[in-house]
Amino acid sequence: MYNSILNIEGNNQKHTLLDLSAKVEYALLALLELAIHHNKKVPVTMSEITAKQAIPERYLEQILTQLRRAGLIQSQRGAKGGFVLTREPWQITLLEIVSLVEGERKEREESSSITLEKTLILEVWEQANIASVEVLRRFTLQDLSNTREDRSQQNPMYYI
């Protein structure tokens, strides 16, 4: 998976904007795995998620606990236990997931010397933030699941 949402190239240098933290990436991967199995009504175990998505088990355990406490998933105990989504995948936006995992953004402290140049830069950054929020609001777990399905059918793997 990519380490950023957007890469801009110029002067043979790569600039990364809107970093995708490992915590958000792992949460999205785990939830995508649950979304893929959602229609089957079968819980997915933590070991299945770690094996399929290469997420460290200890880290995944913390993320799943956070998602469970927030009510996005529930755990089922027993021999056929595991984790399931509490809502339909089309009802869960990527913005909701990112906000839940990352928490609220801290407000930037105002500088004592506000210049025209700083104001212009902050206005552009605010527009970039608004655009990223709109993209994340527009996409759901169902969208990721559908795209995954489409791409896996386009590139079938042949075994010998």
Image (tube, rainbow, N blue to C red):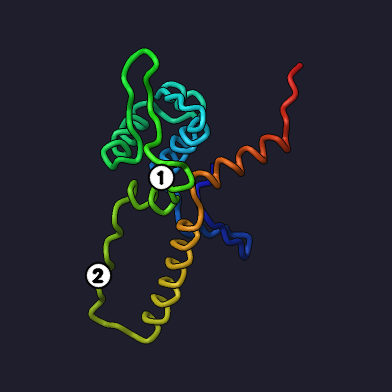
How crowded pointer 2 is (Cα within 10 Å; few <14, some 14-19, many 20+) is rated as few
Circle number at residue 109: 2
Left or right position of 104 against 124: left
Q: Amino acid at mark 2?
A: Glu
Q: Residue visible at 72% across and 35% down?
A: 155
> How far across and how far down the image is residue 94, in percent?
45, 50
Secondary element at tag 1: helix
Residue 135 location, x and y as percent?
Answer: 50, 60
Residue type at mark 1 is Val
Q: Residue furthest top?
A: 79
Residue bearing the label numbered 1: 24
Q: Sequence-wise, which precedes: disc 2 or disc 1?
A: 1
The image shows residue 53, relative to residue 108, as above or below, that is above
- Residue 152: where, in percent of width, then height? 67, 35
Q: CA distance from mark 2 to mark 1?
A: 25 Å
**146, above or below 13, in the image:** above
Quadrant position of residue 62: top left
Q: Give the quadrant of residue 157.
A: top right
Relative to residue 88, is residue 46 depicted above or below? above
